[in-house]
Image: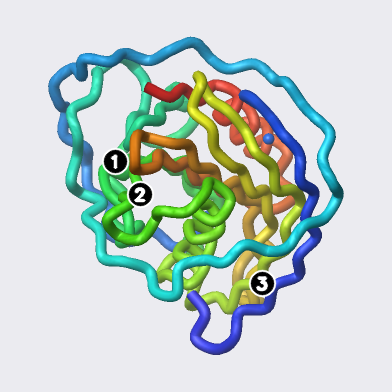
Amino acid sequence: MIIGVLAIALTTVVGVVVFGGGLRQIIDATPATPTPTRLDDSSPTPAATPTKSPSTSPTPKALVRCPKGDPTLRAPHPIDGRVYGGNLSFDQQPTFELAVIEQRFTFAYDVLQQQVMVSQNPPWIAQLAVGQLRAKDGFVNDPRNTVESLVQCVITGNMYRPYLPTRTDIRSESLSIDGRSGWLIDSEITVDRPDLQVKGDHVIFLVVHDGKDWGFFFGAVPIGNARLDAVLAATIRGLRAS
């Protein structure tokens, strides 16, 4: 994403949640291939249990360099009306296109996403994606450091880099989904492109433990789009971990 220096305006609120709220131009979307049913089926949707934490804390360190993964490498998952990637899944959103492999998460594995066009010229999409980050590639720290690495790899990757993005964090908090602990970062990513019809994206980055690896969720909708913000919030509430 960033050719020059990434500007970061950071306002962090640390808390705990237990679920429980365009991307960029479209490049190389590959239809997903159905795969066999996995042995461990999805568990119930999580419920909220907030706790009080300090309002600020140091910014965790991200990976120095994003690794080379294989987002097209799919694991076996159920075929049950949900979108699966890594150990996370969400209900298919009927107002979005059918799920396809998302190849632009070049540092990840098993990435499936739904998208919907929000602007035609130039093109811009809203997107919901799940996948896996692997410990062998350097995603080995605690959940907060791992999600920070996810944020940096997305923002400095080819989805946002051409648009000179600026990140402003809204909240940063621990979470648990179906007994899997993790961390969430809620951000606005504004872009410097006057020809675009959007200011940028409201984005949720989320990771949860998957053994020694991590499941991740990425959701991005245009800033100020209340309808798509509601879809993003509902998708997060319905996340399941297996």
Please tell me how crowded label 3 is: few (under 14), some (14-19), or many (20+) other residues with Cα within 10 Å: some
Find residue 163 and report its image quarter: bottom right
Mark 2 and mark 1: span between their CA atoms? 18 Å
Relative to 147, does residue 183 appear above or below in the rendering? above
Question: Residue 117's spot in the image, x, y percent?
Answer: 48, 48
Instruction: Look at the image and name its color scheme.
Output: rainbow
Mark 2 and mark 3: span between their CA atoms? 24 Å
In the rendered structure, which disc, 1 or 3, sits on the residue that comes first in sequence? 1
Q: Which residue is mark 1?
A: 100
Question: Residue 234's spot in the image, x, y percent?
Answer: 61, 26
Amino acid carrying label 1: it is Val
Per the rendering, the mark at residue 71 is: none
Q: Secondary structure at mark 2?
A: strand
Please tell me how crowded label 2 is: few (under 14), some (14-19), or many (20+) other residues with Cα within 10 Å: many
Q: Look at discs 1 and 3 and give the one toward the viewer.
A: 3
Question: Residue 127's spot in the image, x, y percent?
Answer: 48, 45
Relative to 202, does residue 195 appear above or below in the rendering? below
Q: Nearer the viewer, residue 115 or 50?
A: 50
Tell me which residue sits at (49%, 86%) in the image.
3
**Residue 167 shown left or right of residue 69 in the figure:** right
Q: Which residue is mark 3?
A: 166
Please tell me how crowded label 1 is: few (under 14), some (14-19), or many (20+) other residues with Cα within 10 Å: some
Query: Is residue 94 shown to the viewer in this render?
Result: no
Per the rendering, the mark at residue 133 is: 2
Q: Look at discs 2 and 3 and give the one toward the viewer.
A: 2
Amino acid carrying label 2: it is Leu
Q: Secondary structure at mark 1?
A: strand
Tell me which residue sits at (69%, 42%) in the image.
173
Relative to 162, does residue 91 appear above or below in the rendering? above
Q: Look at discs 2 and 1 and give the one toward the viewer.
A: 2
Tell me which residue sits at (18%, 46%) in the image.
73
